[in-house]
Image (cartoon, helix red, strand yellow):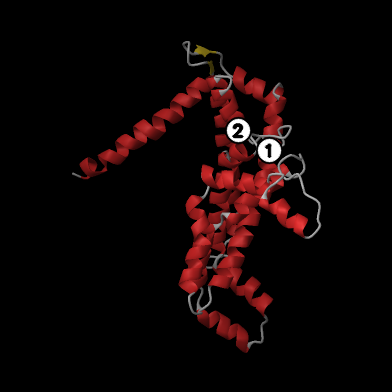
Amino acid sequence: MGLLFIMPWVIGFLVLQLYPLVSSFYFSLTEYNIMSKPEFIGLQNYKKLLTADNDFWNSLRVTVIYTVFTVPGKLIVALMVAMVMNKNMKGINAIRTIYYLPSLFGGSIAVSILWKLMFQDQGIVNSILNVFHIPSVQWLGSTKMALPTIILLNFWQFGSAFVMFLAALKNVPADLYEAADIDGAGGMTKFFRITLPQISSIIFFNVIMQTITALQSFAGPMVITGGGPLKSTYVLGLKLYTEAFSYYKMGYACAVSWIIFIMITIVTLVLFRFSSMVVYYEDGGDF
């Protein structure tokens, strides 16, 4: 009876997850363009990626930069807003809802189009700068500004991390702050000695999830810049898409997808390896 009830999930896992995973690995070892049968070539796709494809190394560099700035930036903003929202004041529930609303559209094409319109040469951002007699900035047309502009989009979409931080802050025992007040501790001391250790597990979880999301980024760079200018926003997700649906090199694209998967696995394992050093546990762990 138990197997009968979990059968829909088992079928979904086998058909929609395990089979695509295994088949993509097989295709990554082949030369495959959809129109003809896959031709097994071993590790040639991986060899070409790592030794002869300059676009891959550029995409890897862009993806790493994007991830390094996006993850901590989004989490810092989310934690700051959560701390402000963790106050008892009139209408606070409505304010929290308003702050969370943008995340309901997180990663959507519509939000990316809106961001592109805001930061184009004649967009609202440059119009506001011109009001204060500040020259317009080529936010999307400059190789130095395009990637930071896309990173800013992710700072704005912090809702999921914000909700988890807010829940974690509400679970911090009030008596810890009361004891700190009696001892004369200041705000910064309470933040670093009480708040951060108590919510460190949620911080760690958010770091893991946001890192995985950032390494797979696609929608924003695709819609806003298409990977330009001069491939300065050409993340690995765009590299995968281009190889698969522009050049129809499906085997090569599958190899790119497995490189991304391996990156995510390595980063996750490294983070878990050092988690005991930064996550506080009630049973005696250290922060």
* Residue drawn where x is 55% and y is 24% of the image: 244
Mark 1 and mark 2 in contact (Cβ < 8 Å)? yes
Q: Is 148 on the left or on the right of 4, as rendered?
A: right
The type of residue carrying mark 2 is Leu
Mark 2–mark 1 distance (CA, rounded to whole Å): 9 Å
Tag count: 2
**Secondary structure state at the residue bearing disc 2:** helix
Q: Which residue is mark 1?
A: 233
Q: Please provide percent x and percent y for residue 185.
A: 66, 83
Q: Please provide percent x and percent y for residue 77.
A: 62, 61
Q: Earlier in the sequence, mark 2 or mark 1?
A: 1
* Residue drawn where x is 71% and y is 47% of the image: 148
Residue 279 figure quarter:
bottom right
Crowdedness of circle 1 by 10 Å Cα count: few (<14), some, many (20+)?
many
Q: Quadrant of the N terminus?
A: top left
Of 188 and 175, nearer the camera is: 188
Q: Give residue 285's mark.
A: none
* Residue drawn where x is 58% and y is 58% of the image: 276
Residue 144 figure quarter:
top right
Q: Please provide percent x and percent y for residue 98.
A: 50, 64
Residue located farthest toward the bottom when viewing the structure as drawn:
182
Question: On screen, 250 above or below 178?
Answer: above
| Residue 282 in view (yes/no) | no
The type of residue carrying mark 1 is Thr
Crowdedness of circle 2 by 10 Å Cα count: few (<14), some, many (20+)?
many
Question: On screen, 209 above or below 58?
Answer: below
**Secondary structure state at the residue bearing disc 1:** loop
Q: Please provide percent x and percent y for residue 40.
A: 52, 13
* Residue drawn where x is 22% and y is 45% of the image: 2
Q: Which residue is mark 2?
A: 238
Q: Quadrant of the C terminus?
A: bottom right
| Residue 61 in view (yes/no) | yes
